[in-house]
Amino acid sequence: MAPIDPHSFTDSTHPLTTHISLTFYFDFPSSTISSATLLSFSTPYTGPLTLDTRSLSVSSVLDPLSLSPLPFSLSPTDPILGQSLNISISKQTHQILILSKTSPSSSALQWLSPTQTFNKNHPFLYTHCQPIHARSIFPCQDTPVARVKYTAKLNIPRELSAVMAARHVERRDPIPSEAQGVCEDSVWCGDDRVVEEFVMEQPIPPYLFAFAIGELGFREVGPRTRVYAEAVPEVLDAAATEFAGTEEIVMVGERLFGPYEWERFDLLVLPPSFPLGGMENPRLVFLTPTVIKGDASGSQVVAHELAHGWTGNLITNKNNEHFWLNEGFTTYAERRIVEAVQGEDIASLNIGIGWMGLVKDMEKFKDNMEFTKLKTSQAGVDPDDVYSVVPYEKGFQFLQRIERQIGRPAFDDFLKKYIGTFKFQSIDTDMFLNFLKANVPGIENEIDLKLWTEGTGIPPDAMEPVSNLYSKIVSLANEFKLGRIPREDEVADWKGQEWELYLENLPKSVEASQVRALDALYHLSESKNYEVKVAFLQLAISARCRDYYGVVERTLKEVGRILYLRPLYTALVQGDRKEEDRAFARRVFSEACDSYHPIAQAVVEATLAKNV
């Protein structure tokens, strides 16, 4: 066996799937999906075939033409990879059909009860498949190398609607005999059921497979953008206002990076439990409601997810060891879009916040420097456990270093050629470096490419951002050490990003009285911008200012975004924290964990286990 990805059982000698036809029956009472998965290969094949699964029960594997069973077995469970589905194909075929059922504990699915939604009337379900969770929905070659097109039929309760990261074909009544064995026709065609049909005509890596089901509404905000959310007028209206400038962002992206290849750029604002800021699912970006800040600054997250339309979705890392090819490029592209739309000062603030995060994560990995590299070794490593800003920010710094060397016009030309050459492909670091050296002759003599991609830490030719606004904020943060709080006239124009950069630059050891004085003036603990609120609460915890522990508890219970959960729980339990704080963290988690996504639950559990 020759694996092609440390996080997949996929064998390099087996054919890659090119198309998947999915038939899903959603049973909300049992929190399960019964599935028929029809895998198609580019050429007929006979022999062994290995697929990825996690927490799936597989009832049968069939030849789709004769419906004759194919021998199969499931391996013992690997704690990271799940189980391999091993199939024996004795007669040449280019398709196989698999009947399976998800577990209520599927790591890609969060089933929300009506009480966990805004309207409290109906349940809600959404997916998150990155990096290796698609296998917990249906059997597949769950590696970015296996780019697939797909069709999907979703049989759901009639009172709900579905959206998908694919083109919507139709909403219609179920048809007898189309169930493909996932359930009886009488169940499939129940009066209370409806089928939503979708098609994805561009090949995507499996981690970009995505759907959501619930009581959904939408607002049109541009010629190729709808904003979806739960059908709550105030949520939809706030989202539509926040993202009203989306078309301008798309047009800027096209000017910088070439045509947007995905036709639609729709946005779905999910319930607060969504574990990320955004997920770049093609045609339908998933967003946390915390990006709705009331000042249009949430458009920065939108810019990042849009940039993935070129770097990540269009060109994809071959596996998670080369994750920087997705996120470093996308962070660079995002900041170019932000600079064009909001100006150089705001772009510099973003770079500065990113720089602080990079320095912090370098410290986090001081005992495991492998994960301060861009090109990493991840065999035997759960990619969720080593997620950090390193591939984002060190990758950004690497690309900015190349830009400084050859100049922006030449780098822009290089980027467009890179995107045009590798679009709809999955590549690795060496492929990028070879392309770079071929198209920028002599670059390896000017920049130490091996140090940047395989070296640990921050290279000496990385650059902290320089701008008047950035320098002013850092200077004010340094003065806090001397007991000076900024005057109101000095911060009158500050929005969330300015406050975030200021708070990130404050000393980690401050007096509780300083924390209270800062909040008395600027009410940071009440900020609607969660980046600001969480940065302030971290400061309060470090000062053991218990006045704010009630706000900490409410925050940990009202949002499920890992970006906020991890630092707050870590601040409560790390180092020489008193047992009182650790007990507080354990109690809050026990009361809040059911509202967290499975991935977020695992992250917090690991944080508590490491520090408690």
Image (cartoon, helix red, strand yellow):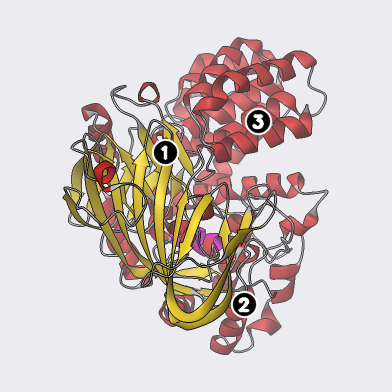
User: Counting other residues with Cα less than 10 Å from the Cα at mark 2, is it few (<14), some (14-19), or many (20 or more)?
Assistant: few
Nearer the observer, 279 or 195? 195
Q: Position of residue 555 (x, y in %)?
A: 52, 23
Horizontal side of residue 337 vs 597, given as left or right: left
Type of amino acid at the residue the image marks with label 1: Thr
Task: For marks 2 and 3, give the one nearer the viewer.
Answer: 2
Q: Secondary structure at mark 2?
A: loop
Instruction: Give the residues in magenta.
Output: 327-334
Q: Residue at x 32, y 44 (%)?
A: 268
As drawn, 309 above or below 26: below
Type of amino acid at the residue the image marks with label 2: Ser
Q: Is residue 214 magenta?
A: no
Q: Position of residue 405 (x, y in %)?
A: 59, 75
Mark yes or no: residue 292 visible.
no
Q: Look at mark 3 in the image and give the residue it sits on.
A: 479
Find the distance from the CA under tag 3 to the CA under tag 1: 34 Å
Q: Look at mark 2 in the image and give the residue it sits on.
A: 12
Q: Earlier in the sequence, mark 3 or mark 1?
A: 1
Tags 3 and 1 touching, CB below 8 Å:
no
Q: Position of residue 337 (x, y in %)?
A: 39, 59
For the C terminus, the quadrant is top right
Find the distance from the CA under tag 1 to the CA under tag 2: 37 Å
